[in-house]
Structures are given as structure tokens and as C-alpha cells.
Image (cartoon, helix red, strand yellow):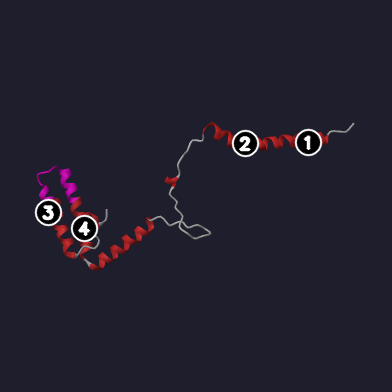
Amino acid sequence: MNHYERLEVRRTATRAEIRAAYLRKAKVHHPDRQLEESAERRERAEIRMRALNEAWAVLRDDDRRAEYDRELARLARLEAPAPVFHPVTDAPVDDDEDDVEFVPIGREGMLLRAIPLLVLFAILFFILVFTAYAASPRP
């Protein structure tokens, strides 16, 4: 979760919008408001508050915010898949594997797929018979 998501603001939010979001979230998650809760819930509130404080510290400072935005953009480029291009036409290739549909071929289709293999075996058989006949001594 990045700082913008943590404060629930847009990346284009103004400093005033970010401050208002920080104050709104801090009122809800501040550990002092969790005194009646269990120790575990208070500890989680402290962790959330530290994260909110870090987000506010980064986003309120223009230099730190610009650096943070550059880092987010760099990470987004690293996570984005590289486009695939056709080697000849240099056009983008749709590499979506979900477009392929499985169609059962049935018995007739299996026979059609077996014909090239049967033809190959027949040719090899005739070559074997012919070489055996040609290699045998003549009377």
C-alpha cells in the first residue's frame, strides 16, 4: 500500500486535501483513542498511526513527494509487462492466451490426424521391403 492509498487521496491531491485526509485518519487510528481496547488492538493502532505519520511526512514536503512519485513511477514501469512485437511487421502482438478455445475433435478428427502417421509407416515399410529385396542375391 502506498502513501496515497494509505491516506485515501488521489496522486494529484493538493497539500490541503492531503492534510485533511491525514487529520481525518489520525482521529480514527490514534492510539490515545484506543485506551479502552485490548493491548493487541492498541499496538495495531500504533502501527497504523506510524504509517500515517510517515505518509504525511513524505507527502507534505514537496521535494520528498516528488522523489516518492518518481520512485512509484519507476516501480510501475518495472511491474508492467513489456509489449510484444511481431518480428517482421513490428506490430503489437496480442499475447492473450485466453483467446484459445479447446474444441474436441471427435473420432473422425482423430482419424484425420492419424493419416500422416500411417502414410509415413507405409513408406518406411515399403523402403524396408524394397531394400531387403534389392539386397537379396538373384538366381
Residue under label 1? 130
Residue under label 2? 115
* Mark 1 / mark 4, whichever is N-terminal: 4
Residue situated in front as seen by the camera: 41 or 137: 137
- Badge 4: residue crowd in 10 Å (few <14, some 14–19, many ≥20): some
Residue 119 occupies which quadrant of the picture? top right
- Badge 2: residue crowd in 10 Å (few <14, some 14–19, many ≥20): few
- Label 1 close to label 4 by CB (< 8 Å): no
The C terminus appears in which quarter of the rendering? top right
Q: Nearer the viewer, mark 2 or mark 3?
A: 2
* Mark 4 / mark 3, whichever is N-terminal: 4
Tell me the kind of residue under disc 2.
Ile
* Mark 2 / mark 1, whichever is N-terminal: 2
Disc 2 to disc 3, C-alpha distance = 76 Å
Tell me the kind of residue under disc 1.
Phe
- Give me the disc on residue 27: 3
- Locate residue 138 relative to residue 87 in the image: left or right: right
Q: Position of residue 63 (x, y in %)?
A: 25, 68
Q: Is residue 35 magenta?
A: yes
Tell me the kind of residue under disc 3.
Lys
108 shown above or below 101: above
Residue at 52% x, 33% y is: 106
Q: Nearer the viewer, mark 3 or mark 1?
A: 1
Secondary-structure class at tag 3: helix
Magenta part, dominant SS: helix
Q: Nearer the viewer, mark 2 or mark 1?
A: 2
Residue under label 4? 9
